[in-house]
Image: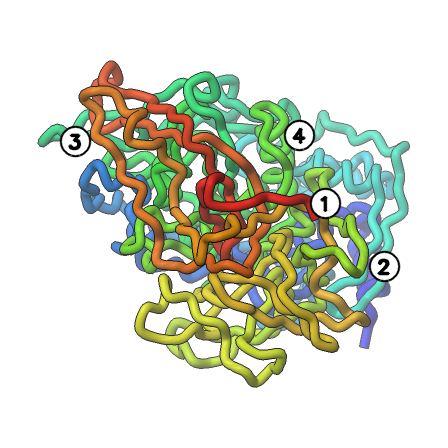
């Protein structure tokens, strides 16, 4: 059996492609992983991400599933949006698997499943693109800029160039990694390589429209595709609210979503004025970035109006499980650069209390908890994402530290999930790296999972990939409740939750932070899904939003980590007429706590906060 390093070497030699080009393109697509022959979220297979354009899309985008109102505002009735016209099919650039089969004589099945064949197919494609450009079959990687740009499958010159620039950045920096098959692969750094960008013009691609209007790092090719702010019949409007952030409302969060839909259909959804919006969409196969809502304005995406008013939402093309179980490196890198840019611009700390998934957003009220969403799910690699942002998740305590950060080795952490195949929901998902760990009621693998009374009022937590009721994820920090041998218990949703944490292969590390405990004399304290002001803060004409606690119990003797401290705020924006919008600020102070898989809020007078 050919080893992967040997496969890269042989394919490069066979097709006349510089090995550094082949390795760098593969790294940007898959980080050299094989993913068991399973598709990416963009229907790409293997280390070279050969695509067949046939990823199964969900029947409805997750914002339209009927459970969660993306606006998340109980002061304004939601409307059921109509889905935009759908356009099935994928461009020829996303059928590279078929072209690779033609060039190599290999079957599409083998190209999907055999890493060596897949690498050979990718090399054949690069050589084919080089010939089509009339470029020399050069041994100098600098001469392959045009072929690399075409490999992106991008339909605009700036996007193709952005992909190629990332590939050459990998060549400049070099990379070393142990892949998911255990192969050790190294690409030595080559900062002396200066690509010949003149070949880009041979692709004859159009330019992005209105590229200068977007808010994004200068190193990224960004497109402005506006979400409509439009008045609708019956006094309704869509699909976002105008605001004046951060002057009017401080931005606390950047929310990571996946689309549960293909890119083109997602773009159609955000252009629908009926109901929903988000700030940015990222495409999987090339990392292309489009902005739809100004960061100063409030998009409707998180299902919690308080979070929406203080968040920027990023949708990533992909599927939590059904249709693809891994996200491309090209999309991770673009997203990381964007999040770092936004965090620096708006003073958002780079930690998991502020960079959150849609699955970490709390329900606004008790009846909203059950319908909250689960994306981007357990296959989003949070540790790698933070590494790319230059803010690696690391231990900063010792064995006796009272708080821990969940930090499993993503590639080796392969917990049991079910539900990836919608036709066989009880079947086990393919083994795959994961950022989550299961939480049990006892320090035994065969003990029941802990229960989330909000998500499962009448039943138990399940091992479904879509059920995070009994999971803790990378970067989240919890207070240790007990330790027994190889097992650690944390306080989670009002109970002890156990996970296997052996010293030889820990999935959690010491991490110092603040923690909140009920104030002495209180048997329990309420937890909230929003941090709204006290009643006295509301001016005449603005309805008071009651402080309604969620259904959970935060009892004396328990402690939870504190992610941020804030003062109550409510943005009233229920009409198209922006002169009627109001920002209400009070004096009520809240602490955001990591109460379960989701963050929640407690009033400062109800708890004592200490440093660990």
Pointer 4 local density, CA inside 10 Å: few below 14, some 14–19, many at least 20: many
Q: Mark on residue 9?
A: 2
Marks 2/1 in contact by CB < 8 Å: the verdict is no
Per the model, the C-alpha gap separating discs 2 and 1 is: 28 Å
Report the residue marked by disc 1.
387
Coordinates of residue 60 in the picture (x, y in percent): 31, 55
Q: Position of residue 514 (x, y in %)?
A: 64, 45
Query: Earlier along the polypeptide chain: callout 4 or callout 3?
Result: 4
User: Mark 1 or 3 closer to N-term?
Assistant: 3
Q: Disc 4 marks which residue?
A: 200
Is 531 rendered above or below residue 569?
Answer: below
The alpha-carbon separation of the residues under discs 4 and 1 comes to 30 Å
Residue 52 can be seen, yes or no: no
User: What kind of element bears circle 1?
Assistant: helix
The 10 Å Cα crowd at callout 3, few under 14, some 14 to 19, many 20 or more, is some
Q: Secondary structure at mark 4?
A: helix
Identify the residue at horizontal 34%, vertical 50% (top origin).
549
Between marks 4 and 3 in the image, the one whose residue lies nearer the viewer: 3
Q: How far separated are the C-alphas under marks 1 and 3?
A: 43 Å
Measured as percent of width and height from the top left, residue 466 is found at 44, 65
Q: Nearer the viewer, residue 38 or 116?
A: 38
User: Which disc number belongs to residue 236?
Assistant: 3
Q: Nearer the viewer, residue 374 or 538?
A: 538
In contact (CB < 8 Å): disc 1 and disc 3:
no
User: Judging from the image, what secondary structure is the residue with disc 2 in?
Assistant: helix
Residue reaching furthest bottom? 446
């Amino acid at each position: 059996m050919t080893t992967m390093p040997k496969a890269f070497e042989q394919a490069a030699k066979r097709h006349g492609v510089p090995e550094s080009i082949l390795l760098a393109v593969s790294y940007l697509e898959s980080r050299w992983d094989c993913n068991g022959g399973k598709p990416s979220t963009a229907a790409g297979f293997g280390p070279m991400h050969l695509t067949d354009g046939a990823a199964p899309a969900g029947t409805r985008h997750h914002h339209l599933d009927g459970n969660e109102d993306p606006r998340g505002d109980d002061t304004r009735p939601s409307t059921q949006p109509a889905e935009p016209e759908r356009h099935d099919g994928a461009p020829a650039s996303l059928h590279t698997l078929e072209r690779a089969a033609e060039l190599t004589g290999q079957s599409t099945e083998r190209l999907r499943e055999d890493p060596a064949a897949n690498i050979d197919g990718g090399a054949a494609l690069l050589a084919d693109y080089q010939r089509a450009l009339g470029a020399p079959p050069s041994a100098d990687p600098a001469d392959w800029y045009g072929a690399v740009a075409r490999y992106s499958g991008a339909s605009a010159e700036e996007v193709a160039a952005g992909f190629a620039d990332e590939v050459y950045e990998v060549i400049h920096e070099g990379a070393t990694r142990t892949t998911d098959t255990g192969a050790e692969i190294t690409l030595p750094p080559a900062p002396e390589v200066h690509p010949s960008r003149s070949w880009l013009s041979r692709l004859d691609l159009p330019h992005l429209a209105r590229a200068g209007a977007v808010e994004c790092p200068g190193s990224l090719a960004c497109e402005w595709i506006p979400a409509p702010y439009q008045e609708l019949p019956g006094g309704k409007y869509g699909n976002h609210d105008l605001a004046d952030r951060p002057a009017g409302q401080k931005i606390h969060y950047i929310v990571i979503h996946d689309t549960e839909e293909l890119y083109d259909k997602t773009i159609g959804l955000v252009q629908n004025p009926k109901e929903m919006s988000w700030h940015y969409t990222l495409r999987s196969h090339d990392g292309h970035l489009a902005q739809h809502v100004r960061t100063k304005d409030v998009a409707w995406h998180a299902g919690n109006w308080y979070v929406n008013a203080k968040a920027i939402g990023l949708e990533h093309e992909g599927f939590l499980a059904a249709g693809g179980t891994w996200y491309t490196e090209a999309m991770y890198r673009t997203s990381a650069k964007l999040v770092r840019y936004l965090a620096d611009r708006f003073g958002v700390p780079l930690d998991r209390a502020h960079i959150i998934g849609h699955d970490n957003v709390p329900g606004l009220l008790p009846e909203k908890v059950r319908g909250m969403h689960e994306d981007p799910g357990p296959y989003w690699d949070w540790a790698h994402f933070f590494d790319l942002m230059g803010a690696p998740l690391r231990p900063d305590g010792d064995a006796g530290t009272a708080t821990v950060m969940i930090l499993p080795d993503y590639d080796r952490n392969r917990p049991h999930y079910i539900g990836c195949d919608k036709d066989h929901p009880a079947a086990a998902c393919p083994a795959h790296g994961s950022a989550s760990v299961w939480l049990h009621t006892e320090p035994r693998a065969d003990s029941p999972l802990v229960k989330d009374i909000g998500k499962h009022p009448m039943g138990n937590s399940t091992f479904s990939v879509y059920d995070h009721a009994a999971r803790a994820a990378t970067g989240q920090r919890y207070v240790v409740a007990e330790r027994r041998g190889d097992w650690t218990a944390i306080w989670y949703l009002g109970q002890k939750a156990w996970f296997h944490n052996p010293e030889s292969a820990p999935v959690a590390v010491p991490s110092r932070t603040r923690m909140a405990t009920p104030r002495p004399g209180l048997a329990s304290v309420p937890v909230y899904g929003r941090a709204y002001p006290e009643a006295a803060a509301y001016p005449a004409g603005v309805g008071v939003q009651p402080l309604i606690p969620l259904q959970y119990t935060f009892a004396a003797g328990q402690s939870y980590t504190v992610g941020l401290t804030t003062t109550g705020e409510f943005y009233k924006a229920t009409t198209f007429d922006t002169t009627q919008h109001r920002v209400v600020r009070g004096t009520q102070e809240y602490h955001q706590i990591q109460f379960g898989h989701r963050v929640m809020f407690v009033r400062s007078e109800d708890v004592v906060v200490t440093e660990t």
